Image: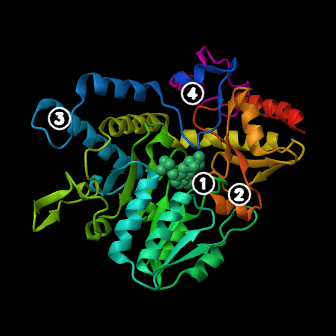
């Protein structure tokens, strides 16, 4: 792959011309890459997003001039790194509108955040006969940890069904909730369907029976302004690498009272108060849940990414992406034999699809040769595939830097690929 200027620009008359798309694209150096001699059209933002120059520079500067361990050193580099690390905790608290940065725990990603809650909430609060509700459209990361803890604690998993559009059945949800329900785990946005779930309403109903709610925000945080206080979420998690930040860092927000009562997840250095061979006491939140040396530079990079997102503004990004979703949906619907999987009225900028007579994997592989990067497979959501009676889908997912021209390039490439395959 060679880095040359990507010529894809916005067509005139686009409804989002006020959005600074050219400046945004210029901030992401990888978008100037060519793949097989074609301009890169990157439409796999649901899997991971690219990094703006300010994040790349921030990490480079941090490693070049500021790097040190956190919360352990008495020397200037360590104190500076500790301050930068803590600044990100504050930035995340602001990003989620959390009451306090003490309620922000750094994890490796959404997967680790959910495993943390499954382990620590599960060992603290679950008893035999208790129930955990998850939805039919969860990512495996929000299914398997619950199965594991349910097995250990003798709890039962109940599944909130969805309809043929990929919309959760809220009356079924209401009837599944009972005093036995201890926890509801649901994604804010489905990675396989794009559905935006009514999490505020779900939380309200769960609280009415005394259940706590974990919201998996892996696919929402790049697109939707999240306010954990307005939602009244007990736990909310997301992954740095999906919000234009580095890999290896994620976030768990948890309400103070729950986090303080919960047993630790991992144990070791930096999460203790006193250790002797007779036993150990643990330190306060958030450090109680952050054993070992954390991903320091990645956390610092996350802070920069959140500042960048905030500068552009999530409402403006959401509006731009809503236009891309509507435009792509309309264009894709003109393709003979193409079926969109996930047709909820409220969707984030993600489209799963299948095409008669063409396997998603072949579509993805051939699109790559046209410079178009999309995701194919079960998207770590095998129950969703089963629900729609497909083994896999192809998926395009848009980010803040995508354009209508890229959608045109994708649709044109898809038509070419389908001519070859059918
Ligand atoms: N989805 C995709 O859809 P990690 O890998 O920990 O950063 O995120 C896991 C995860 C959890 N919940 C949802 C809703 C997700 O979409 C994901 C990751 C990626 O392409 C990889 S399968």
Q: Earlier in the sequence, mark 4 or mark 3?
A: 4
* Mark number, residue 404: none
**Label 4: element kind:** loop
Nearer the observer: mark 1 or 3; the answer is 1
Residue underneath mark 4: 20
Q: CA distance from mark 2 to mark 4?
A: 27 Å
Q: Is residue 225 visible?
A: no
Q: Is residue 58 above or below residue 126?
A: above
Work out whether residue 317 or residue 183 is closer to the camera in this orientation and state it.
183
Nearer the observer: mark 4 or 3; the answer is 3
Q: Earlier in the sequence, mark 2 or mark 1?
A: 2
Residue drawn at x 21%, y 56% as measured from the top left: 271
Tag 2–tag 1 contact (CB < 8 Å)? no
17 is within the stretch colored magenta: yes
Residue drawn at x 18%, y 59% as measured from the top left: 283
Q: Earlier in the sequence, mark 2 or mark 4?
A: 4
Q: Quadrant of the C terminus?
A: top right
Tag 3–tag 2 contact (CB < 8 Å)? no
Tag 1–tag 3 contact (CB < 8 Å)? no
**Label 1: element kind:** loop
Residue underneath mark 1: 380
Crowding near the residue tagged with mark 1, few <14, some 14–19, many ≥20 C-alpha atoms within 10 Å:
some
Residue underneath mark 3: 78
Nearer the observer: mark 2 or 1; the answer is 1
Nearer the observer: mark 3 or 2; the answer is 3
Work out whether residue 266 or residue 387 is closer to the camera in this orientation and state it.
266
User: x%, y% of residue 371?
Assistant: 70, 26
Task: Give the color scheme: rainbow, by chain, secondary structure or one colour.
Answer: rainbow
Tag 2–tag 4 contact (CB < 8 Å)? no
| The magenta segment | 1-28
Residue underneath mark 2: 345
């Amino acid at each position: 792959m060679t880095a040359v200027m990507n010529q894809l620009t916005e067509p005139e008359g686009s409804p989002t011309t006020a959005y600074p798309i050219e400046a945004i694209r210029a901030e992401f150096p990888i978008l100037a890459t060519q793949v097989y001699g074609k301009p890169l059209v990157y439409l796999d933002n649901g899997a991971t997003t690219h990094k703006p120059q300010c994040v790349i520079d921030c990490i480079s500067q941090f490693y070049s001039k500021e790097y040190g361990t956190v919360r352990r050193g008495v020397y200037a580099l360590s104190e500076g790194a500790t301050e930068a690390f803590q600044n990100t905790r504050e930035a995340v608290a602001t990003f989620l509108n959390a009451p306090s940065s003490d309620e922000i725990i750094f994890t490796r990603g959404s997967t680790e955040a959910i495993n943390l809650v499954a382990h620590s909430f599960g060992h603290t609060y679950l008893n035999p006969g208790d129930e955990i509700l998850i939805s039919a459209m969860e990512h495996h990361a929000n299914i398997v940890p619950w199965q594991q803890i349910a097995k250990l604690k003798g709890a039962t998993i109940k599944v909130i069904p969805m309809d043929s559009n990929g919309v959760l059945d809220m009356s079924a949800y209401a009837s599944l909730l009972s005093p036995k329900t201890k926890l509801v785990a649901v994604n804010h946005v489905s990675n396989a369907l794009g559905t935006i779930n009514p999490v505020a309403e779900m939380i309200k109903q769960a609280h009415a029976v005394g259940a706590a709610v974990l919201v998996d925000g892996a696919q929402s945080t790049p697109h939707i302004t999240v306010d954990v206080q307005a939602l009244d979420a007990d736990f909310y998690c997301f992954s740095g690498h999906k919000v234009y930040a580095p890999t290896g860092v994620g976030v768990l927000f948890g309400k103070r009272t729950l986090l303080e009562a919960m047993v630790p997840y991992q144990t070791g250095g930096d999460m203790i108060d006193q250790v002797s061979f007779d036993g150990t006491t643990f330190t306060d939140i958030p450090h109680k849940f952050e054993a070992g040396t954390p991903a320091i530079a990645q956390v610092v990079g996350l802070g920069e990414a959140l500042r960048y997102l905030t500068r552009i503004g999530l409402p403006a990004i959401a509006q731009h992406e809503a236009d891309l979703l509507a435009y792509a949906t309309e264009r894709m619907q003109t393709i003979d034999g193409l079926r969109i999987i996930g047709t909820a009225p409220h969707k984030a900028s993600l489209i799963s699809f299948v095409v008669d007579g063409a396997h998603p994997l072949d579509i993805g592989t051939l699109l790559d040769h046209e410079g178009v990067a999309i995701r194919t497979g079960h998207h770590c959501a095998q129950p969703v595939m089963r629900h729609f009676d497909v083994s896999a889908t192809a998926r395009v997912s848009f980010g803040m830097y995508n354009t209508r021209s890229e959608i045109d390039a994708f649709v044109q490439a898809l038509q070419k690929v389908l001519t070859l395959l059918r």
